[in-house]
Amino acid sequence: MFIEIKTNSSVPIYLQLAHQLIEGIVRGELKPGDSLPSVRAFAADLGMNMHTVNKAYHYLEEKEFIQIVAKSGVFIQPNGIPGATVIEKQQLKEQMRPLLAEGLVLKLSEEEMVKMLHELVQDIKEGKP
Amino acid sequence: MIILLFAFILLFTTVLQAFMPKFLKQTEAFGVYVPEQYSTEKTVIRLKSKYTRVVLIAGLVILAGYLLWSLTQNPTEATLALISVGVQFSMLFISIGYYFMMHLRVKKLKEEQKWLSGKSEVRVVDIKFQDKLKLIPKVVFIIPMIVTIGLIIYTFIKYPEMPDMIPTHWGPNGQPDDFSEKTYFSSIAILLLLLVMQGMFLLMSEGMRFSGSKINPANKKTSLAQQLEFRKYTSWFALFISISVTLMMGYLHLQTIHPDISSAWVMLALPITFLVVVLFGVLIYAVKVGQSGSRIKIKEDSPNLEHSITAVDEDRYWKGGILYFNPDDPSILAEKRFGVGWTLNFGRPASWIILLLPLILILTIAFNL
């Protein structure tokens, strides 16, 4: 699986990394128990500081999408990722709220935004950028 | 004989140096990153062929001058050796000097024509790169080192039978011309040198494991496959040289212990065979594999002709297009930009240790003889 990072994007690199790994999990390209590159190897491939990769891994570890096992490596959650809890659902909703508000201010209709959502889900599943 | 040998080496290095642009990636010209769509730009192509022409002509003129001088003037052996080495170095300086002129011209062209404006720079990583990488395992590189350690032990067992003077240098005719008094150190000095060299080949192969892959976003699958092949072949090449050096130096050493296995004919043929074998290996490596595997044909090509994306421009980390200095990148080894093979990331302290430690060890061994 290829990861593509835009270095002159406004999205921080660690987030781009984390988002693409999450999309890989969604598509099943990264399966439970699959190993991810070591921080060192990943940073070398990116030509970037190890700190950036560490940050992305910790971000994913906090969400319990991956497991960082000292001295053995980094793995996609071996038991699979459980469905969203009530709290997680609430958090996602909170994160979506300002985006929807921004859309409404820009006079997008509810239908248009629902259509956008469908398209995005499709893109993520097909791995389109 | 010596003259012919030097002339042959000079010819070989000249041709290799002159045709260097042919062995490199299309996206790098004279150490400058060239986005895919400009790699076939007329000016760039013209500069490359001009470089080839100038270096080739300069090399052939120097070669002719060298042959004329050495064959008509009948120089003494010392003068000949001095001039022969001097000639090789001047050729090296000429090609490097001309490289720099070209480097600056391409750099200027890139700025003037704004090759990167309006493009987004993309870094591509294959997260399974480590698993796909097929390098020769560490153990295989350690075997020749064990052989050397075995030879050291054998030498100590045979120590009383060894001659009082240990040869430490061999002349071009294959006969020893410099000796050291027998001590436990001088009796194994050549083996210690061998051990240092074997260690360097081991480090080289292992270093590739942790060297960042550079995948071209315009040609992901092809450049990934080429990278993997390049590393595999480098690893084989390092092993091949490691074994050749072991055989040559091991024989040199053994015949000091057992003079009866020595033969003038073998001593004469051995270094030349070694040289030819190594040069032949270099040639295959450059012509068949090419830098970053750029000469390996890969099927199943799906080039992305979108001109809005390019690879990340790393020119700022490449001083003069030759020295890689990037403290953020944890890679110790990096693929050279101008040349076939690898260089060190001088932004990492470990690189300096890898560069200086063998040098210090070799000098220490040499000066204690």
Image: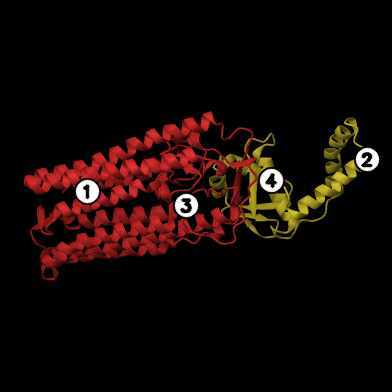
Chain colours: A yellow, B red
Q: Chain of mark 1?
A: B
Horizontally, is B105 left or right of B254 in the view? Answer: right
Circle 3 residues within 10 Å: few <14, some 14–19, many ≥20 = many
Mark 2 to mark 1 CA distance (whole Å):
79 Å
What's the residue type where badge 4 is placed?
Ala
Q: Residue at x 34, y 57 (%)?
A: B283
Circle 1 residues within 10 Å: few <14, some 14–19, many ≥20 = some
Q: Chain of mark 4?
A: A
Q: Secondary structure at mark 1?
A: helix
What's the residue type where badge 3 is placed?
Ser
Mark 1 to mark 3 CA distance (whole Å):
35 Å
**With respect to residue B312, does B291 lie above or below?**
below
Mark 3 to mark 2 CA distance (whole Å):
51 Å
Q: Tell me which numbered mark, 4 or 2, is placed earlier along the sequence.
A: 4
- Contact, mark 2 vs mark 1 (Cβ under 8 Å): no
Mark carried by residue B365: 1
What's the residue type where badge 2 is placed?
Glu
Seen from the viewer's position, the closer of residues A69 and A113 is A113
**Between tags 4 and 1, which lies in front?**
4
Q: From the image, tell me which residue sits under label 4.
A: A18
- Contact, mark 4 vs mark 3 (Cβ under 8 Å): no
Q: Residue at x 44, y 51 (%)?
A: B291
Q: From the image, tell me which residue sits under label 2.
A: A110
Residue B235 image point, x, y percent: 42, 59
Mark 4 to mark 3 CA distance (whole Å):
29 Å
Seen from the viewer's position, the closer of residues B259 and A111 is A111
**Between tags 2 and 1, which lies in front?**
2
Mark carried by residue B234: none
Q: Chain of mark 2?
A: A
Q: Residue at x 17, y 54 (%)?
A: B4
Do the residues at pointers 2 and 1 share their chain? no
Mark carried by residue B292: 3
